[in-house]
Image (tube, helix red, strand yellow):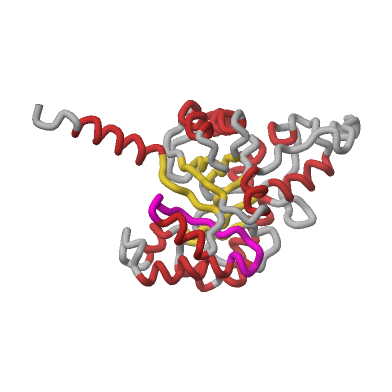
Amino acid sequence: MADPYSAQTPGSFALRRSRVLRKIADGKVARVLKLNTTDPKVAEIFASAQPDAIWLCMEHVGANWSDIEHQIRAARIHDVDTVLRVARGSYSDYIRGLELDATGLIVPHVMNVADATAVRDFTKFAPIGRRAVDGGNADAQFTRVGLLDYMRQANDERFVCHQIEDPEAVENLEAIAEIDGVDCLFFGPGDYSVALGIPGQIDHPDVQKVRQKVAEVARKNGKIAATVCSQTNIHSYADMGYNFLNVGADVIALVNYADAAMAAFGEL
């Protein structure tokens, strides 16, 4: 059987460049909006606001791969990245999102060096990792990107966020950050507060201390520092060193709108 890549002219086609990585390379903060719904129209509405990325989820949301594929396309219309939080599983559960042309992944509850290394090996091509190769999907323009170009560009233009949200991960933070192929440390204050026995107290001093530490360790090691924030603390988190900030979510916007609309009736 003929090699499907052999007829491709190197450099004639390329992966879509990451808007997030361009923004961060310019020394700026990547702006992110989160979706808990699966409708591609919502993804397109959010993308038309021109964030650098929209955050899709398969960890806590009942999205299927078709839903994710349509949301990625909707964002791509506006040249907006998509960052997919995956469900923990086999390597296929990670790379399918990338092959649908998600620009980045968020891998939840990375615990230690062995775990972070396994995630790296699943999601990065050789010589960095051991990602399985196909090249016949949307990210490689359905074989139009030559194999070697595809592997190189996927390593350069796609990124993986290792979510730090457990005490065990904090104990191993420096070693995780030193791993080649760990692109981003993403602090999850909600689950971290639960692990400390102070659920929801994301501004507790013990949570604040780790929030600061994640940013410092990430930036010291040349990694992206990511977390969630509100509109009121964007600047303080950026000053802390975070250069990838998620602000709000579609469900929050919908709840606030619905509640305000009903409250407008008053006692009528």
Q: Which of the image's four quarters has the C terminus?
A: top left
- Is 260 displayed left or right of 58 in the figure? left
- Residue 51 rendering spot, x and y as whole percentages: 53, 41
**Viewer-nearest residue: 43 or 24:** 24
Q: Which of the image's four quarters has the N terminus?
A: top right
- Residue 81 rendering spot, x and y as whole percentages: 60, 40
Return the residue found at the far left: 267
Per the rendered image, the range of residues in magenta is 218-232
Taking the magenta stretch, the answer to whether it contains residue 19 is no
**Viewer-nearest residue: 247 or 186:** 247
- Residue 44 rendering spot, x and y as whole percentages: 51, 29
Tell me which residue sits at (53%, 56%) in the image: 226
Tell me which residue sits at (71%, 49%) in the image: 131
**Vertical order, 260 against 210 (above or below):** above
**Vertical order, 128 against 65 (above or below):** below
- Is 199 displayed left or right of 40 in the figure? left
- Is 227 displayed left or right of 91 in the figure? left
Tell me which residue sits at (30%, 34%) in the image: 257
- Is 190 displayed left or right of 185 in the figure? left
**Viewer-nearest residue: 246 or 95:** 246
**Viewer-nearest residue: 184 or 91:** 184
Number of numbered discs overlaid on the protein picture: 0
Q: Quadrant of residue 37?
A: top left
Taking the magenta stretch, the answer to whether it contains residue 220 is yes
**Vertical order, 236 against 7 (above or below):** below
